[in-house]
Amino acid sequence: MLGLKFDTETSWVDVAKNGLQQLLTDHAFAEQKAASNAVSIIINYSEETALVKDMSDIAIEEMEHFRMVHNIMIERNMVLGQGTKNDYALKLQKFFPHTGKRSEALVHRLLVAALIEARSCERFKVFADNLKDEQLSKFYLDLMVSEANHYTLFLGYARKYMDKNIVDKKWNDLLAFEAEMMKNRGTTAKVHG
């Protein structure tokens, strides 16, 4: 369904479980960054009414997810740590060359956002399926559905703003790049680590 070209190894689940506070902190900040991205799209493409409406919904939903993760941390006597740079997202953002064309820049942003959501969805499922902690397992399965919806929304918008064949070529190239990158990951307790 997601079209990812690399599957997360279940060994990452052990890394994530053993560094649960770091994972939850990273996840909380990833939700904030997703909300910020949606707000940034609104600011930069405010004339796109349907896009603005959907990005508003995503920004609100992502901040609600942040609050949910933070509440789980509080329940478990954990303190939200410092946010760190998301090297996964930064590498994806550098994949497409800089362009002066607004519509192409938007398509690139939407494709990167779609891939981040797709990978989050896949990671949440792998995590949930391999947890004995029922609360966390249910939480991540529920979030997985939301991430899948965001993935399809971002990809759908990318195809709206540029010829579908061109977008699909860009998408497949990005997927291949991300798959190679993911082969060297899975060793840190981060959502995309």
Image (cartoon, rainbow, N blue to C red):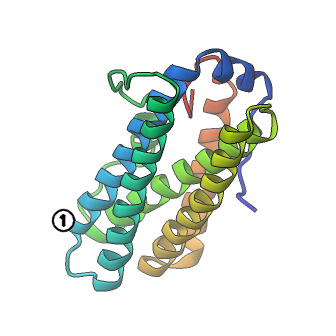
- Which residue in the protein does label 1 denote? 43
Specify the quadrant that holds the N terminus. Answer: bottom right
Mark 1 residue crowding within 10 angstroms, few (<14) / some (14–19) / many (20+): few
**Position of residue 8 in the picture relative to residue 107 (left or right):** right
From the viewer's side, name the closer residue of 167 and 56.
56
Vertical side of 13 occupied by 164: above or below = below
From the viewer's side, name the closer residue of 53 and 132.
132
**Position of residue 185 in the picture relative to residue 93 (left or right):** right
Q: Position of residue 31 (x, y in %)?
A: 42, 46
Residue at x 80%, y 31% (from the top left corner): 132
Vertical side of 173 occupied by 129: above or below = above
Residue at x 56%, y 77% (from the top left corner): 164
Please give the count of numbered marks on the rendered protein: 1
What amino acid does circle 1 point to? Ile
Q: Position of residue 27 (x, y in %)?
A: 48, 36
The quadrant holding residue 50 is bottom left
Residue at x 35%, y 69% (from the top left corner): 55
Vertical side of 94 occupied by 87: above or below = above
Give the secondary structure at mark 1: helix
The quadrant holding residue 184 is top right
From the viewer's side, name the closer residue of 32 and 4.
32
**Position of residue 106 in the picture relative to residue 20 (left or right):** left
Residue at x 72%, y 57% (from the top left corner): 3
Does the image show residue 88? no
Does the image show residue 17? yes
